[in-house]
Image (tube, grey):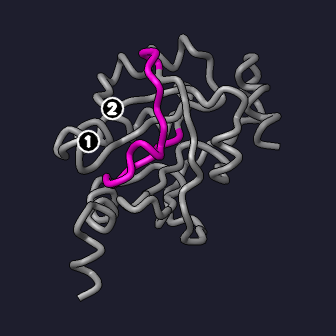
Amino acid sequence: MVLGTALARQSGDTQTAAVNSTGGLGTLKTRAAPDFTLTSYDGSQINLADLRGRAVVVNFWASWCVPCQQEQPMLVRVARTYDPQTVTFLGIGVWDAERDARDFMARYQVPYPGGADVGGRVTINWGVAGVPETFFVRSDGTLTRRWVGPLGEDNLRTFIEEIRPGAEASTAS
């Protein structure tokens, strides 16, 4: 279903793409985050395994998604407050035309890497049902939280503090 929706969207049919208009915690089994490699919109390679040792915030979005447009300025603002060597943000464009996705990244001056999930494999492996959805990965590669729908700044910062390097030690004691 998700792959069919992604392919339909990439061909211009937006009628079947799911939009998460309200935010809340999604169900998630704590596990190793599914690895992926994407080509970023600037042509470089993004590989999740290469980010081991950092906390990673993975945001699935689409340029035509109104809640994605509404949360993007906040994601950009918060991302700029963290050292990308400690907390890395990744944007994954789904169900979108490449030109529209590139325009979205430019419009919001997104400072972190983003790429298209061509073929929808990452979207399927991560269990994404609609956009926006945001996942939080600890520095050891463990997937710990899933937020379905637009994310608020307070929740974003709280979830980042839970996954940033060193947080595991401070919460264990």
Residue at numbered disc 2 = 112
* Relative image position of residue 79 (x, y in whole percent): 26, 41
Q: In which quarter of the image is the N terminus?
A: top right
The residue at 62%/23% (across/down) is: 96
* Relative image position of residue 153 (x, y in whole percent): 29, 53
* Relative image position of residue 141 (x, y in whole percent): 45, 59
Residue at numbered disc 1 = 79
Residue closer to the observer: 69 or 111: 111
Question: SS at mark 2?
Answer: loop
- Mark 1 neighbour density, 10 Å: few (under 14) some (14–19) many (20 or more): many
Q: Judge from the rendering whether residue 53 lies leftward or rightward of residue 12; answer left or right.
A: left
Q: Judge from the rendering whether residue 33 lies leftward or rightward of residue 12; answer left or right.
A: left
Q: Which residues fall within the magenta stretch? A: 41-60
Q: Earlier in the sequence, mark 2 or mark 1?
A: 1
The residue at 48%/51% (across/down) is: 134
Residue 169 circle label = none
Q: Are marks 2 and 1 in contact (CB under 8 Å)?
A: yes
Residue found farthest to the top: 99
Q: Label 2 amino acid?
A: Tyr
